[in-house]
Amino acid sequence: MRVGLPRALLYFKYYPVLEQLFRSNGWEPVVSTPTNKRKLEQGLALCEDEVCLPVKVMMGHVRSLAEQDIDALFVPRVVSLERKRYFCPKFLGLPDMVRCSLGNEIPLISPTVNLSWSRLKIWQEGLKSCNCLKPWRWWLSLNSAARIHRRHLQAGEPVSPGGGKRVAVLGHCYNIYDEYVNFGLLNTLAQLGVTVLTVENFTREQIEEGARGLSKDLFWSYGRDVVGAAFYCLARGAADGVILVASFGCGPDSLIIEIIQQRFARFDIPLMCLTLDEHAADTGLVTRVEAFVDMLNWRDVC
Ligand code: SF4
């Protein structure tokens, strides 16, 4: 069975697990090609204006997959991937948005994903959402996916070990790793010779250490990781500068930007916020990033 897997949202963080789950259950993953102008326009046409950019991009990928030769489309309803922490409501409503846009054009596989459930309940939910899964095979693949996921959560090498100033680029994985959406931000920084760190370069312990600096804990998984990494940079001097990448129209981002800006105002590590939307232009973004890196370099001279 050929199953469409949109190259958007959580694909950027969980693709090793997803591809393994697909293949071990006999599905052929058909991953959409990287985001481009056409996909973004398709997404814009399917969404209300106030929807955040990453969801518009997701809808563009869904539309482009629906035009391909696939048997089903995988759009999970992601509730939680860690205990007592949750994803924003857009993740919960995503299968409904897709169904509303595509109608019955293509069958959807949309299990509810809540890792605070027991392994047994997750297994049952998978069987309920797709009747072509073989129970024993599905159980084994869940176990090996959990192992891959644990390995994948280890902190990785810096994205670009440029050797110059260390710049932490913090934000949702789908904003940081989708080059079309962020106008090649990581490449731009690499060309400027800086060492780029992302949330994935911080260990769980480092993020937890940073997040302990919050006066009230956050229950948004991603937002908390970003705040934890930013606060860790402040506490341990782990970066020379921080670039916060947010989406226009994102509720959780508007909160975490405020929290991080207030904390950074009291310290000496430069912070820059980039807000992405469909109207942003690469020239403005590149100029701001170049100026930020120049400023970091001049700080040594002054
Ligand atoms: S967290 Fe923000 S950017 Fe991500 S899907 Fe929700 S509203 Fe959109």
Image: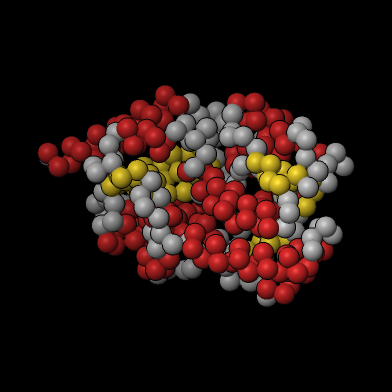
Residue plotted at (57% across, 31% down): 278
Is residue 102 at all visible to an observer of this figure? yes
- Whether 208 is drawn above or below 29: the answer is below
Please indicate whether residue 261 sits to the left or right of residue 175 in the image.
Answer: left
Residue 85 place in picture, x, y as percent: 57, 66
Residue ranking furthest to the top: 283
Residue ranking furthest to the right: 104
Residue plotted at (61% across, 63% down): 145
Residue ranking furthest to the left: 301
| Nearer to me, 72 or 186 | 72
Q: Which of the colour schemes (rainbow, by chain, secondary structure, one colour) is used?
A: secondary structure
Residue 183 place in picture, x, y as percent: 47, 31
Residue 267 place in picture, x, y as percent: 26, 55
Residue plotted at (47% across, 48% down): 171
The answer to which image quadrant residue 41 occupies is: top right
Please indicate whether residue 105 sits to the left or right of residue 38 in the image.
Answer: right
| Nearer to me, 191 or 298 | 191
- Whether 96 is drawn above or below 143: the answer is above
Residue 230 place in picture, x, y as percent: 37, 56
| Nearer to me, 64 or 148 | 148
Please indicate whether residue 13 sits to the left or right of residue 60 in the image.
Answer: left
Residue plotted at (32% across, 57% down): 233
Is residue 56 at all visible to an observer of this figure? no
| Nearer to me, 158 or 278 | 158
Location of the C terminus by quadrant is top left
Figure label count = 0
